[in-house]
Amino acid sequence: MRILIYLFFIINICFSFDLKGINNIKADFVQIITSDNNKIKYSGNAIITKGYKSYYEYTKPIKKQVFTDEKQTIVYEPNLNQAIIFDSKIGLVDVLNNAKKDGNKIISYINNTAFLIFIDSNDMPKKIEYIDDLDNKNEIILSNVKVNTNIDDSIFVFNAPKGTDIIYSKSNIFQP
């Protein structure tokens, strides 16, 4: 789950570098996690705004939705009919202030983790690489990146289906 919050930070970091006039990004993503030569591949799409609002829809290998705003993060797993709510009070401003552009990539540090964010010739994010707390190599590849599209704000609102178990996490950080 920590990977979801990292993706949120990384995309938001990209807004701080020469992306003048960008209010939102929509993108498809593939996330590959390598641990002891074993790989797992996730895919989905994301909508991230310049503020704290974001929506992630994981489509493979399992369906999952993630909603974030300035107060909380909600992870909804439809197969379990379960939503976990996390307090998302994290120092995003500090993360943005510490990020540095270096050629065609951006380097940032979040909780002592170094993130390499590669951008294309149009200054759009295309790939993110990092090693997580469990020494797993993570690679996130973005495609079909679109900026400043019309977004209905209702996409950022979680409406729990009837019978959904709501779990309030005591942690403010996702745990794997």
Image: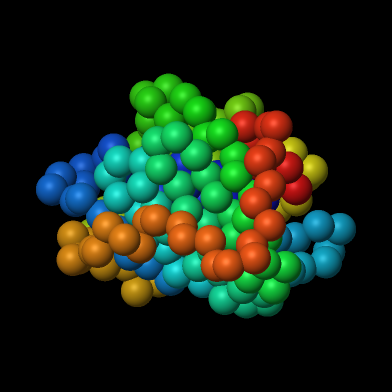
Residue at left offset 30%, top offset 50%: 49
Q: Hey, which quadrant is residue 41 in on the image?
A: bottom right
Q: What residue is drawn where x is 86% and y is 58%?
A: 36
Image location (x, y in percent) of residue 166: 65, 51
Name the residue at the right extreme: 36
Residue 116 visible in this rendered orientation of the protein: no
Residue 136 placed where, x, y %? 75, 51
Q: Is residue 65 above or below residue 131?
A: below
In this rendering, position of residue 147 left or right of residue 48: left
User: In the rendered view, would you say 97 is above or below 129?
Assistant: above
Residue 75 lies in quadrant: bottom right
How has the structure been colored for display? rainbow
How many labels sit on residues? 0
The image quadrant of residue 120 is bottom left
Would you say 98 lies left or right of 59 here?
left
Q: Position of residue 173 (x, y in %)?
A: 64, 35
Residue shown at 70% from the left, 32% from the top? 170
**Percent coordinates x, y for residue 162 in the rendering:** 58, 67
> Extreme left residue here?
21
* Residue 21 visible in the shown view: yes
Front residue of 23 and 107? 23
Side of 56 relative to 150 (left or right): right
Using residue 156 as the reference point, say whether residue 109 is left or right of it: right
Residue at 57 percent across and 76 percent down: it is 59
